[in-house]
Image (cartoon, rainbow, N blue to C red):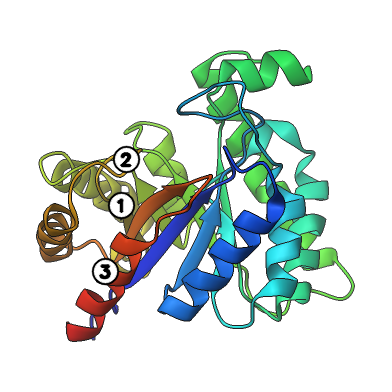
Amino acid sequence: MSRPIRIAVQLQPQHASHYRAIRDAVRRCEDLGVDIAFNWDHFFPLYGDRDGPHFECWTMLAAWAEQTSRIEIGALVSCNSYRNPELLADMARTVDHISGGRLILGIGSGWKHRDYREYGYEFGTAGSRLDDLAAALPRIKTRLAQLNPPPTRDLPLLIGGGGERKTLRLVAEHADMWHCFADADTYPHKAAVLAEHCAAIGRDPATIEHSAALGGDQTQGTVDELLAEADVLTGLGVRLLTIGASGPDYDLTAAGALCRWRDQK
């Protein structure tokens, strides 16, 4: 049986002067029937006024865990560089318990230079950050297995990115979910590379849920265009479709349309 189609919204924690706007947005996502609410792990806005209002990722996820009851939650994605791997495992376990087993542990190697510079983290190179992620993933898994009490379930691990030599190998080795920054033209090749990495270690690539962003990073396009893109991507094998919503208003019109489209499928 093929995986069901799921809808996620990345509630970007930027340009909301008060947290209550984000609290309202995650509750509206749950009411609409959205499957997953993501935020992101940055310290400054990525779009619009780069010095505008912004909130932190993991404290927000803990609040979401209390403020919701059904929707899954997670970071798209948490930056490996910002926290000791054992600490991140403990934070994830705790939010998992607060939520009653609804956390997805999304992680990536990091890329935003300003975050590193202003918060005092060593930026290194793209290669060194990926090497650090490769070293951290077994440590996270080991710590999760040692925590008392343990997580309520085997935490789904999501890795974001499309680097063919390192990132997709890590996805094959560790991830339950893969979020690709690819469109209908580039996704098939990336998926084929991931399948090759899976074959090399004897893993069935069908055990990994494929996620893709609709409309690019800033959710460009009309609702009809997004629905047409969703049709194409799901036809290629993507099963988790993610759109972005930004403050201050957090317009969820497209999210509602996608949930209705999903239900008709």
Three-letter code, disc 1? Ala
Q: Which residue is mark 2?
A: 181
Sequence-first disc among 2 and 1: 2
Q: CA distance from mark 3 to mark 2?
A: 19 Å
Label 3, label 1: how far apart the Cα atoms are = 14 Å
Secondary structure at badge 3 equals helix
Name the residue type under label 3: Leu
Label disc, if present, on residue 18 of the rendered structure: none
In this view, 91 is above or below 2: above
Task: Tell me the SS state at disc 1.
Answer: strand
Q: CA distance from mark 2 to mark 1?
A: 6 Å
| Residues under numbered marks 2 and 1 in contact, where contact means CB atoms less than 8 Å apart | yes
Residue 109 in the figure: left or right of residue 179: right
In the rendered structure, which disc, 3 or 2, sits on the residue that comes first in sequence?
Answer: 2
| Circles 3 and 1: CB atoms closer than 8 Å | no
Tell me residue 118's x, y (percent).
73, 15
Q: Is residue 58 left or right of residue 237?
A: right
Could you say which disc has been placed on residue 212 in the image?
1
What residue type is disc 2 on? Answer: Phe
Residue 54 in the image: state x and y as whole percent.
65, 36
Which residue position holds label 3?
258
Closer to the camera, 6 or 68? 68
The answer to whether one can see residue 203 in this image is no
Task: List x then y, in percent, for residue 139.
Answer: 73, 48
Q: Which residue is rendered at x = 79% and y = 56% of the image?
A: 91
In this rendering, the answer to whether 36 lies above or below 31 is above
